[in-house]
Amino acid sequence: MTKIIAFIILCFFLPFLLLIALIIKLKYPGPIFYSQVREGKNGKPFKILKLRTMVVDSNLILEKMLEKDKEFAKLWVATGVIKNDPRIAGKFGRLLRQLSIDEIPQLINILKGEMAFIGPRPLEIESVKTFSPEARLIRSSILPGITGLMQVRFRSASIRQMMLYDRIYIKNQSIILDTYILYKTIFAILKRTGK
């Protein structure tokens, strides 16, 4: 059922995605999509898909920022979030992120059985290697999600907060909780409180 819903939503958004892809290509030269290896269910790695909302040399910009500012480096390790991120490709890229439009290609990940609509957000392999074996096992016990309990509670949270809310979700997973998360996600998108 999840895959059928994902397919219908993807078909609905396809013309819109093609237009956005064209704008990205014309306005910000480089790849249209961004993919990165993340840890999935049972520790299986997969490539997450997003519309590219950052400049091509974003990794180089991040490296320079981490070298230049020790306090920022500590914050980055703790949250993985940058306020007023200079790597974002202009106002258009920021708008796509605020409305979570950049996440739509993850519907393909759902069709491939790599993700669900709701679950813990998939993290980079290097990030999860820092977790305890128990914490990593719990997180990877279910499919990662496009949205989750932590995302609707915090837009910028510490790793500790993320682990806590992921555990709460996994322990209390239900249709009622999923409905609540879906409602809160739509509300956050409409309020444009995205990244």
Image: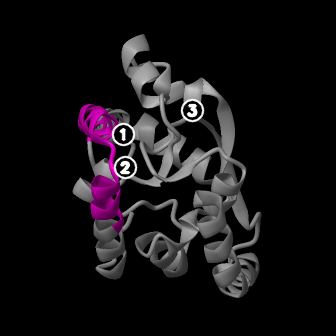
* Image point (72%, 87%), residue name: 15
Membership of 161 in magenta stretch: yes
Give whichever of discs 2 and 3 has the lower sequence position.
Answer: 3
Give the left or right position of residue 195, taking residue 40 as reference: left
Q: CA distance from mark 1 to mark 3?
A: 25 Å
Give the left or right position of residue 114, taking residue 69 as reference: right
Magenta residue span: 158-182
* Image point (66%, 32%), residue name: 45
Name the amino acid type tagged 1.
Trp
* Image point (32%, 38%), residue name: 166
Q: Residues within 10 Å of mark 1 (few under 14, many from 20)?
A: some
44 or 62: nearer the viewer: 44
Give the left or right position of residue 69, taking residue 5 as reference: left
Name the amino acid type tagged 2.
Val
Picture quarter containing residue 67?
A: top left
Q: Is residue 51 visible?
A: no
Which quarter of the image is occupied by the C terminus? bottom left
Q: Nearer the viewer, mark 2 or mark 3?
A: 3
61 or 154: nearer the viewer: 154
Membership of 46 in magenta stretch: no
Q: Nearer the viewer, mark 1 or mark 3?
A: 3
Picture quarter containing residue 182?
A: bottom left
**Residue at image mark 1:** 76
**Residue at image mark 2:** 81
| x then y, percent, for residue 106 | 62, 59
Element assignment for label 2: loop
* Image point (41%, 73%), residue name: 98
Q: Are marks 1 and 2 in contact (CB under 8 Å)?
A: yes
**Residue at image mark 3:** 41
Dominant secondary structure (helix, strand or loop) of the stretch shown in magenta: helix
Name the amino acid type tagged 3.
Lys
